[in-house]
Image (spheres, grey):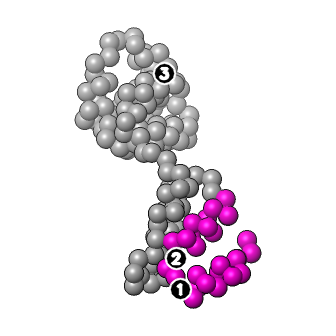
Amino acid sequence: MEATLPMGYIAVPFTYDGTTDSWAHVCKFKSTVHLHRFSDGIKCIAFATTLEGSSQFWYNQFLDGVIHSFKGFSSMLLDHFVGSEKQKKSALTLFIVRQERGEPLRNYIRRFTNATLNVPSLSHDILTNALLQGLKDSELFKSLTKKPPNI
């Protein structure tokens, strides 16, 4: 708290209220402060200003001298708000995306593609198998099972 704010300091324009993904907030904050090359002390001060609601209440309970570094401060926030982190999905979740009765193929492909965005590190085999399994028994399905796509 002894750090001096640099001339022309502009507050970070986003906040964290404790209900959304704390990891996403810390990552976004780190990117922002890296761009501005803040010192560790300024990072702590600036990070505290991004807190609101329940996260601000949590922060206000600290005694002076408890926070010694940004790494420690952000770790404490992540530990406390671990329940609000967005859960990573596994490849298995793709196998429940199914083409619905009467749903155009274009809509199914769009929904399937959106589902893949939330699953880290997918192989082409898993993607292909999940996509095929979700297709309704159609001419495309029959064609792809007879001659799988070359990827």
Marks 2/3: CA distance?
Answer: 48 Å
Q: What secondary structure characterizes most of the magenta part?
A: helix
Q: Position of residue 52 (x, y in %)?
A: 28, 35
Residue 31, above or below 102: above
Q: Residue at x 45, y 45 (%)?
A: 87
Q: Is mark 3 on a helix, strand or loop?
A: helix
Left or right? Give the position of 115 relative to 57. right
**Residue 144 lies within the magenta run:** yes
Question: Please, what is the three-letter code of the amino acid marked with disc 2?
Answer: Leu
| Residue corresponding to mark 3 | 72
Question: Please, what is the three-letter code of the amino acid marked with disc 1?
Answer: Ser
Q: Which residue is drawn at 56% across and 37% down?
A: 34
Q: Position of residue 133 (x, y in %)?
A: 55, 70
Say whether disc 3 or disc 1 marks the residue closer to the N-terminus.
Answer: 3
Left or right? Give the position of 79 relative to 145. left
The residue range painted magenta reads 123-151
Residue 23, above or below 40: below
Marks 3/1: CA distance?
Answer: 55 Å
User: Closer to the camera, 149 or 33?
Assistant: 149
Question: Please, what is the three-letter code of the amino acid marked with disc 3?
Answer: Gly
Q: Which residue lies furthest to the bottom in this view?
A: 139
CB-based contact (under 8 Å), mark 2 and mark 3: no
The image shows a total of numbered marks equal to 3
CB-based contact (under 8 Å), mark 1 and mark 2: yes
Q: Residues within 10 Å of mark 3 (few under 14, many from 20)?
A: few
Where on the picture, by quarter, is residue 9?
top left
| Residue corresponding to mark 2 | 135
| Residue corresponding to mark 1 | 138
Q: How crowded is mark 1: few (under 14 residues within 10 Å), some or many (20 or more)?
A: few
Q: What element carries label 1?
A: loop
